[in-house]
Image (tube, helix red, strand yellow):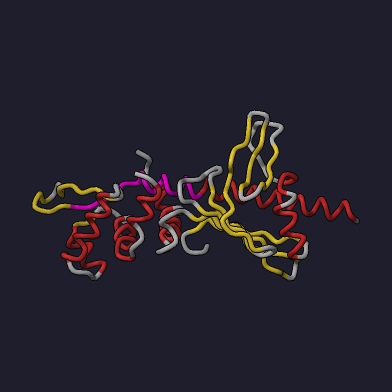
Amino acid sequence: MASGEVTITAIVPLEIDAAFSAFTTDIDRWWVRGPESGTVVRFEGERLLEVSTDGAVTLATVTASVPPTHIELDWDGPHSAPGDKVIVDFVPDAGGTRVTIRHRRQGIESAGALSAVIGLWWGDRLSKLQRR
Amino acid sequence: MTVETTLSALADETRRGTVEALGGGPLSAGQLATQLEVTPAALSGHLRILRDAGLVSVALDPDDTRVHVYSIEPGPFHELSDWAQGASKFWTDQLGAFARQVERRGRGKR
């Protein structure tokens, strides 16, 4: 895991331009959403919105977009806290395009703290420490 | 205490080493200083930060009340772990759905 981030990677069998387009333009086709049915998820201007008949919820604000390689978001969606960033990178790969999502929490990136904590505590030690 | 507080307190190698050492059980400040190869004075500031963040607690050693022993407070670590696990699952689900959509689209074009 990269220092201090939650990092998820997948390789999709598309050229990088098509992968970027499928991720952004076609996001409503694949985005996993909450139990409320009938919502639409789309990028609109600098925002990623989940739109329902009750209105729109801002999931994220785009702070950097470099097609077809990089998107950076201020993340306000699930599992967010103020200052959270989500960074999506697209890199050509033998199998198509490697897509990497990094969810970075404020205070993590400077010292690899999350990596250290996970390394220390996701294993046996955490399970041995009873919740109080 | 928040996840951010926990992370901020752990943004230091000595403090992470302290937490790791205490993972093996309670230790006195002297034992910690020896184990981490730092001076007691230097360790004191780090222990205060860890205590203020709620990551460690201090109590009198029941076998020698002249000595204070430090212990891990597991709550903040569980909170941090819960966030990391939740975020990991969320993004794994999202990226998995994206990959499946790409595969479906590819099959549709064949």
Q: Is residue B75 visible?
A: yes
Image coordinates of residue B97 in percent, x first then y, are 70, 48
Image coordinates of residue B76 in percent, x first then y, are 36, 46
Q: Main secondary structure of the magenta part?
A: helix
Number of numbered tags placed on the structure image: 0
Is B70 inside the magenta-drawn segment? Answer: yes
Question: Image point 66% across, 52% down: which residue?
Answer: B95
Q: Residue furthest left?
A: B66
Where, by quadrant of the figure, is residue A115 drawn? bottom left
Q: Is residue A18 above or below residue A129?
A: below
Is A108 inside the magenta-drawn segment? Answer: no
Image coordinates of residue A52 in percent, x first then y, are 67, 33
Residue nearest the observer in this picture, A82 or B12: A82
Question: Image point 38% across, 45% down: which residue?
Answer: B2
Question: Image point 22% across, 69% down: which residue?
Answer: B38
A94 sits to left or right of A6? right
B70 sits to left or right of B85? left
A94 sits to left or right of B35? right
Image coordinates of residue A79 in percent, x first then y, are 52, 44
* Boundaries of the magenta span: B69-84
Q: Is residue A87 visible?
A: no
Quarter of the figure that contains the C terminus of chain A: top left
Q: Is residue B43 above or below residue B65?
A: below
Where, by quadrant of the figure, is residue A91 drawn? bottom right
Residue nearest the observer in this picture, A11 or A92: A92
Q: Residue furthest top?
A: A54
Q: Is residue A128 above or below residue A40?
A: below
